[in-house]
Amino acid sequence: MEAKEILKEHIAKTASLTDEQFDYFYSHFKLLTYKKGQTLVTEGDKVDCEYFVLSGCLKAFFINDDIKMYILQFAMPTWWTSDYNALYSNARATINIDCITDVEVLCLSSADREKLCDEIHQVEHFFRWRTNRGYVASQKRLLSFMNNDAKKRYEELLALYPQLYNLVPKHLIAAYLGISRETLSRLYSAH
Amino acid sequence: MEAKEILKEHIAKTASLTDEQFDYFYSHFKLLTYKKGQTLVTEGDKVDCEYFVLSGCLKAFFINDDIKMYILQFAMPTWWTSDYNALYSNARATINIDCITDVEVLCLSSADREKLCDEIHQVEHFFRWRTNRGYVASQKRLLSFMNNDAKKRYEELLALYPQLYNLVPKHLIAAYLGISRETLSRLYSAH
DNA sequence: ACTAAAATGTGATGTACATCACGTAACTAC
DNA sequence: GTAGTTACGTGATGTACATCACATTTTAGT
């Protein structure tokens, strides 16, 4: 499917735009492709854009003391990703985003998003709902972190995203779960 | 200050409503008062409203296996609280919200919020930004959970909300930090 | 003011995880 | 091919926390 069609279908789930409105909306996006390993957002740099994933898989992560990596989010097709903290407070990035596989994204600048939200009520409606879903998901993950041990979080993750198991290396799954790669290895060899 | 003034000032930080628009907006809120210990949202019940806190302090929490309590959020004046998961997916509440102190809130039904968002573009703008701030805060807390030990999270919490230390019992602070009350006690007696 | 209940402190012990150490296997590049 | 890197497995040991048990202090109800 075409990039434009994928986005159109995605938006249509929450907002009703006329074809003209959508064409105008879409004209603000840039199609970008990245190779496995390339970086979209680097800690300390300015962040101008958010990304809508068309194909491939990215990770948004944080590195502590140059040693331990924590993954905040895997980004899969039709997901949005960026450093929203930096984006909305006009600060420098505190996280990194790079490509686990080759990737195609649509890129929207923050200035354009605000302009479009202002010009088209339904666009603002869409972004309100998108952020809302993100907020609810984030709260759920927080609760799971407080409530469940590593094994349960691991099973939860696999139930939610079975494709991850074969798509991404195990040490990245460990970094998402907040445990060491050794513990993760022991978890699934135990069963 | 009057309830109406508090809300007006709060909204004005992110959205520009005319006086008429704000009066109309405000007419959809109900002023409610609760006594310490009373419950606003109960796990398993339907959730229709979200709450804007005027005075007092609430907690949004989850109880696991009828034993352990995890606090998702303390809600203080000018904060919003509800079970957003239930509210936006039209499901039953998965968390509880009750009053740590006597409380005054403004209550807005979900149906009215959607109606107002639809009728007044700036209202939708306001709610997009509010959710956005919540999302960013939630991500930060998640990162802190993965990244920091109990002591650091405790210091972070006190730095962010010094008033909590004297306002809420220690075992609730422990429940927010995701540690046992005993561990919290040892943390601050250690220093 | 008196009593019951809730909140807090502190030692002893248990456990889920991390860390370190070292091995093997699987990709990647030239 | 071979060499270097990255992924993965597994034992030994360490540690931050939980849990249990019980004492003390503070708060709330009549």
Image (cartoon, coloured by chain):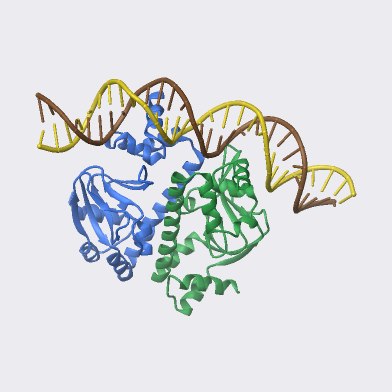
Chain colours: A green, B blue, C brown, D yellow
For image coordinates 49% across by 37% down, the residue present is B148
Q: Residue B126 versus residue B112: which sits nearer the camera? A: B112
Residue at point 57%, 61% (across, down): A76
Instruction: From the top left corner, tell me how far across and down residue B141 is, in percent.
Output: 44, 45
> Does residue A120 show up?
no
> Is any atom of residue A135 visible in this view?
yes
- Residue A163 lies left or right of residue D26; in this view the side is right
Count of numbered tags? 0
Q: Position of residue A101 (x, y in %)?
A: 66, 58
Comparing B185 with B102, the one in front is B185
Relative to C20, is A53 above or below? Answer: below
Quadrant in the picture for the C terminus of chain B: top left
Q: Which of the pair A131/A19 is nearer the observer?
A: A131
Q: Is residue A82 left or right of residue B73?
A: right
Could you say where residue A185 lies in the image, as x and y percent from the top left? 63, 44
Front residue (pair B45, A134): B45
Residue A48 placement (x, y as % from top left): 52, 56
Q: Is residue D11 above or below residue A141?
A: above
Specify the quadrant of the image occupied by residue A107: bottom right
Give the answer, above or below, for where B136 lies relative to B149: below
Q: Residue at x 40, y 63 (%)?
A: A128
Q: Residue at x 36, y 48 (%)?
A: B62
Residue reaching furthest to the bottom = A19
